[in-house]
Amino acid sequence: MRKILTLTKIFLKSSLSNMNTKMGMPSNVKGKHLSKILYTILFLYLAGIIIILSYGMINGLKGIHQETAFIGLILFSILGITTVQSIFSSINILYFTKDSEYLLPLPLKPYQIILARTNVLIILEYIITILVGLIPLTLYGILTNMGILYYITMIISLVLLPILPILLISIIVMIIMSFARLTKNKNKFQLIATALVLIIVIALSLSLNNIDENMTDEQMAQMLVQANSMVKLIKGYFPTLAYLTTALTSNTISTIILELLKTTGLTILGLIIYTLIAQKLYLKGLIGNLFSGETKKTNIKINQKQYKNSKLYKSYISKEFKTLIRNPIFLIQCLLPAILMPLLIIALLVVQFKDMSDVTALLENVDANSFVVSSVILGIIQFFSMFIYVSITAISRDGKSAVFIKYIPVSLYKQYIYKSIPNIIMNIITTIITLIAVKLIINLPIITLILLFIISTIINLVQSILMIIIDLKRPKLEWDSEYAVVKQNLNLVFPVILSMINIMIIAILGFLLNTINVYIGLVIVGIIFGIITYIINRYLYKNQYNLANKII
Amino acid sequence: MIEIKNVSKSYVKGKKSVDNLTLEINDGEIFGFLGPNGAGKTTTIRMITGVLDVDEGEILIDGKSIKKDPLEAKKNFGFVPDNPDMFLKLKGIEYLNFMADIYDIPKNKIKEKIEKLTKKFEIYNELNNQIQSYSHGMRQKIVICGALLSEPKNWILDEPMTGLDPKSSFDLKEMMREHSKSGKTVFFSTHVLEVAEKLCDRVGIINKGKLVFVGTFEEMKQKFKEQASLEELFLEITEQE
C-alpha cells in the first residue's frame, strides 16, 4: 500500500508539473504567479459559465416542480465527460509516459504500478468533477435549501461516481493495447480516439441544435425533463448513477446510507475486477508499446526527384507543415480546428435556420453593407481564430530540439516568421470559409468581402506573431507526449484571450462608428490593426535574441 | 579556428558555471574537451554555438564573433548536439534536403554529398523512412550527416560517439582525422578518455567551470605523474580542485 501511495505521489507530481511550463531552469517566481493568475482566470471563467447555466436550469425546473431532474442530469454529465476524457487520459497516462521504461526494472508488483497510475487518472478527473459537479450541485443545494446531509452525500457521490467509468475505459484501452497492433502505433490510436470523440461531439451538437431559441422557460424545463428520461435509460447500464441519484434526492437517512453503500460496494468490486484484469493485460501492452518502434518500412530506393533544392522559406515552412500534419495530435488540435470549427458552426446555423427565409427576413430591416454588419463578421472570424493553436505551440512543438533554431545560420526573426506562417495560412482558410458562408447568407458586395478579407488577414497577423512571442516567453519544451503540448499547456488560453480582446476592439469600433460608411469604417479598423501589427513585429525583430533566452 | 576569450557564464547569481575560460583551438587541430559531469562542457559548447549568451568575454569562430556577427559565425561551423532526437516526423532525406537549404548547398552538389555521407555511415537505405523509426545510433548518424553536409571548416561535436556502432565510430574518427589534416578544426566533448587519448592533438580539462588543464597528453604526463594512466591523470586533475 505504501508503495502504491509513493508511486501515486510521484506520478501525480510529474503529471502536474507537465501542466506548468518549465524549461529545466531555476523556477521563476514571476512565471509561477502568472500561471496562478491564468489558472484562476480560466477557472473563474468556466465556473461563471457553469453557475449561469445551472441557475437557469434549476429555476426552470423548479417552475414545473421537477428540480430533482437536475441532479440526474448533472451526475449524467459527470459520467459522460469522465468517459470521454478518460479515453485520452488513460491512454496517455497508462501507456505513453516515458517513465514506464524506468519503472519496469524496479522491484514493483504490476498491480502497484497499475493502481498508482489509475489513482492519478482518478485524481486528475476530480479537477473536472469540481467544475462540472461540485459547483452546480452546491448551487442546487443553496437554491433548494438543502441541509448538511445533502452536502455530505454530494461529496461522497462526487468522489465515487467517476471511478467506475475510468476503470471501464481503462480496461477497454488495455484490451485494445494488448491485442491490437495499435500498440506499435500510438499515432493511429490517438487519431482514431480523437475521431471518435469528434463524431460524438458533432452528433451531440447537432442534437442539441434542435433547441428552439424562442423556447419559453417552461418548454426548456420540459425538455430537460425529457433529457432526464434519457438519463434514466442510461442508469440501467450504470447502476451507480441510479444509486447516487436516489441518494441525492432522498430525504431519509436509511435510503441515503443504503444507496451510498451499494455504490461503494460496487466500486470496490469494480476495483477488484479491474486489478485482476489489469494484472493480466497492462504489462503486456506496456512492454509492447515501449519496445516496438514504428517498424513500417518504405521503399529504400531514393528517387532522383527526392534530392530537392528549394528557397529556404519554402523549405522551412514545408518542414513546419510536415511536422504538423504527420503528427495526429498536432494535426487534430492545431490545424484541423481552422477548417472544422467554421464548417461545423456554419452547418449548425444552416440546420437551425432550416428555412433560410428566416434569415432573409431578419436581414431585410438591416443594411447588410453597413459597418455594423462588417464588424460582426470580423468578430465571427476572430472567434474562429481562437481555436487555431499553430503559432502558440510553434516553439513548444519542437520540444528539446527547439534549440536547433539557435545554432543554424538563419536569423531568429526570419525563423519566427516562418514558424508563424502556417498559423497565418490556417487563419486565411478560416476567413475564406466564413466569408463564403457570409456571401451565401447575405448579399454583400465583392469589394466589402475583399476588404473584410484583407482586414481579417491583418488582424490574423497580430494573432500569429503575438502567439509566437508568448510561446517564446513561456515555452513548454520538456514533454514526454505531444498530448502535453496541447492539453497540458496553459499558453493555450492566450489565443482565446487575444481573440476576446480583438472582438472587443472591433465591437467598440462598431458601436462608436455605427453610422460611418462601411469602407471608411473598415479602413479605420485596418489602420488600427495595421499599427498594432507593426508595433508587435518591431518588438519581435528588436528582441529576437532575448526572446529565445528560454530555449536552451 | 575557435577562440574563446575570458568567457564566463552563470545560471544562478553568484555561481559561475563557466569561469573566465580562455581557449584557442587552432586550424588543423583535433581538440578534445573533457571534464566530469556538470563541469561546464555543455555550457561551453552552447556558448560557442550561440545557443547561450556569454555573460562576459568573447567567442570568435574564424574571426567572427558569435555575439556580434552570429549568422556569419554560424556559417563557419557544423554542430552535432548531444541529443539526436530531432525532426522525428521528417524522413531522413527530407531532413538532409532541409539542412542543404539552410546552408545554401548548390543543387548540383546535394545528391553527391548526401549519397557520399549517408553511404559512409550506412544509413543510405533508411533515407526514405521517418527519423522516428531510426535507432538512437542511426539518429546520431543522420544528425552528423546533416552537420557535415555543408563541409563546414569547424566541427563542433557534443559527445559524438554516443550510440554509434564500432564501424561508424571508427569512420567518424577517421573523418575527424582527415578533416584536421586538411587544415580544419575539430572540437568535441567526450567522456571516453581512450578516444581522446588516441584521437586528439590537444585536450582541455574543465572542472567546476574552470579550465584546469590544456595541452597534449605528453604535457599532461610531464606536468603530473609520468607513469600514471590517462584515467589516473584525469582523476588527479579533477579531484585536485
Image (spheres, rainbow, N blue to C red):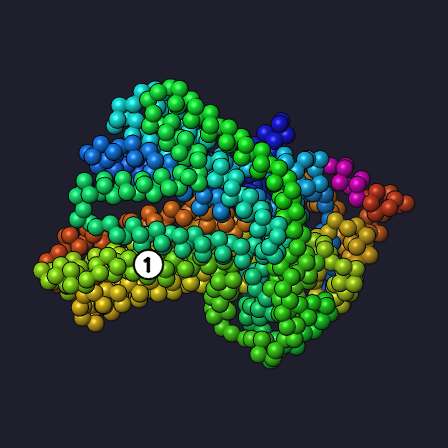
Q: Callout 1: helix, strand or loop?
A: helix
Of residues A204 and A225, which is closer to you in this image?
A: A225
Q: Position of residue B234 (x, y in %)?
A: 79, 44
Q: Position of residue A77 (x, y in %)?
A: 37, 40
Q: Position of residue A540 (x, y in %)?
A: 40, 55
Of residues B171 and A200, which is closer to you in this image?
A: A200
- Magenta stretch contains residue B240: yes
Tell me if B8 is positioned left or right of A354 in this view: right
Residue hosting label 1:
A344
**Image quadrant for the N terminus of chain A?**
top right
Relative to residue A362, is residue A486 depicted above or below?
above
The span shown in magenta is: B234-241
Q: Residues within 10 Å of mark 1 (few under 14, many from 20)?
A: some
Residue at point 22%, 54% (across, down)? A506
Write down the quadrant of residue A76 in the picture: top left
Residue at point 19%, 34% (across, down)? A63
Residue at point 75%, 40% (across, down)? B238
Whether residue B170 is visible here, answered yes or no, is: yes
**Majority secondary structure of magenta residues:** helix
Residue at point 63%, 64% (across, down)? A296
Q: Position of residue A340 (x, y in %)?
A: 37, 60
For the residue marked with disc 1, what is the amino acid? Leu
Whether residue A12 is visible here, answered yes or no, is: no
